[in-house]
Amino acid sequence: MSRDHWERHSWGELASLEYGKALRGYRKGVGIGYRVYGTNGPIGWHSQPLFRGPGVIVGRKGAYRGIFFSKDPCWVIDTAFYLNIRDLEKVDPKFAFYQLKTVNLDDIDSGSAIPSTSRAAFYAIPIELPPLPIQHKMVALLSTYDDLLENNNRQINVLEEMARRIYYEWFVEFRYPGHDTVRLVNSQLGPAPDGWQIVSLEEICDLMKAGATPSRSRAVYWTDGTNDWFTTNELQDGFLLRSTEQVTDAALADRKTHVFRSGTILMAIYGSPTVGRLGVLVTDGCCNQAALAMRSREERVPQMALFYLLMNLRDHFNRIAHGAAQQNISKEKVGATRVLCPPAALLSHWADLIRPLWQQRLVLTKAVSNLKSSRDLLLPRLISGEIDVTELNVALPAPAD
C-alpha cells in the first residue's frame, strides 16, 4: 500500500491526556444518565458528564489498564485519562481509539509502585497518520465488527437477565408455579415453602481446589501449552471459552495444576471485589489457586441452578470473606454455607424452562469470541496500512448534524 500521504507524528503532537476527576455516589449496574469510566472501563452512571465525547478513555492506574471509546458524553474518574484531540479535521476520534488499541500500556508504565500510565511516555508514542478519508474507511470496517459485538452482547444480557429474574422469582420470592397451594413455614433461614430442605452447599455439590500455579520459571510448564488455564480476572459470570494463557501437558503430569471437565463452575475466592465471580467451563480447563471448582450433584440440583444459586449468594460470600491485605473465603466456609433446596421436580421444571436461554447464550458467546478474534486480526493490519483500503468501496456513516 502506498503511504506517501501518511504523516508521521507522536501522540503528543496530536492530542493531550486530561485527568479524570474523583466521583462519589455514582450509580452502579444498569442505569440512566451518563456513563462513568475508570481504568478498566464502564463502572456506573452519573447525572452529569465530564468529557463531551465522542472520544477515547485511557486507563491511568492499575495492572489492567485499558483503552475505551465512548460515543456519548461521559464522566471519567481519576484512575483514567480522556484524550483531547487538538484537530478533529486531522484525527478521527474512533481511529484514535483503534490505533491506541494496538499499543501495550504496560510499555508506557511510569515505574511507580502501582502500575501507571506515564503522560510523557504516551506523548512519545509514534503514529503514522493516514489522510482523514482513509481513517474513515478503516473506522467503518472495524465498526462493523463492533456493532455486531454490541448487538450480540445486548442479546446475551437480555437472556441472562431473563434467566436470573425467573430464578429469583421462583426460588427467592417463592412465586413458582403452584406456590399458592403451598404454605410458608418458619425455618432457620426464615420463611420457606413447606417441604423445602435446608442443606449445606457441600451436600449438593462437589467443591475442588485448583492447586498451585505452575512455576513461571519452568518453561516446560508454559511454552506451547495447549490446556486452558484461567485466572479469576477472566471470571465474568459467563461462559469460559478460551483462556489468555495455556499450560502444557507436563504441568498436568507433574500435578502442578488440575484439569476440570466441561460444565464445571469456577468461583473466585480471593480478592475484592472479585470474590464470588463465576465462570462456566465450555471445554476441559484449569484455573489458578484463587478459584474454587464446583460441580452440582445433579440428582439434587441441576448445574444451571447451582450457577444462579451462587450468584445470589455473592453478597453473603463477600460478607464472610476475611483478610486485611486481600479478601478471601475458604473452601470450608463455602461448603458450610446453608441454603434452601427446593424439591427436585420443581428444580427440573425450572431447568427445562431455562435450558433454551442457557444454550442460546452459549451460541451468542461463541459468536462474540469469533467476532473478536476476526476483528483483532484485522485491526493491526488495517492501522499499519498492510491492508489497502484506498480503493475500497466502504459505506461511511452520515456526518453528524
Image: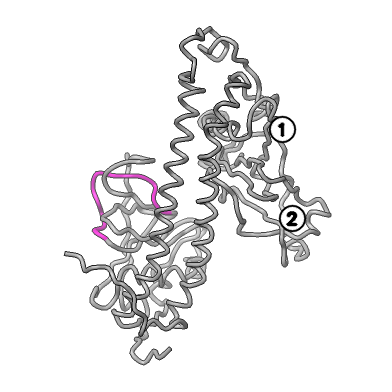
> Within the image, what quadrant is residue 101 found in?
bottom left
Task: Indicate which label's residue lies in the foreground, 2 or 1.
Answer: 1
Q: Where does the image place residue 315, in percent across and percent down from the top left? A: 50, 31
**Which residue is at 71% across, 52% downward?**
213
Q: How many marks?
A: 2
Asked whether the viewer can see residue 63, the reply is no
Residue position marked by numbered label 1 in the rendering: 206
CB contact under 8 Å: marks 2 and 1:
no
- Sort mark 1 into few (<14), some (14-19) or many (20+) by Cα contacts within 10 Å: some
- Residue 45 among magenta residues: yes
Above or below, 106 against 282 in this view is: below
- Sort mark 2 into few (<14), some (14-19) or many (20+) by Cα contacts within 10 Å: many
Above or below, 28 against 108 in this view is: above
Provide the residue span drawn in magenta. 41-53
**Which residue is at 53% across, 7% downward?**
185
**Which residue is at 47% across, 27% downward?**
168
Label 2: element kind: loop
> Within the image, what quadrant is residue 140 found in?
bottom left
- Residue 306 among magenta residues: no
Label 1: element kind: strand
Measure the alpha-carbon separation of dots 2 and 1.
24 Å
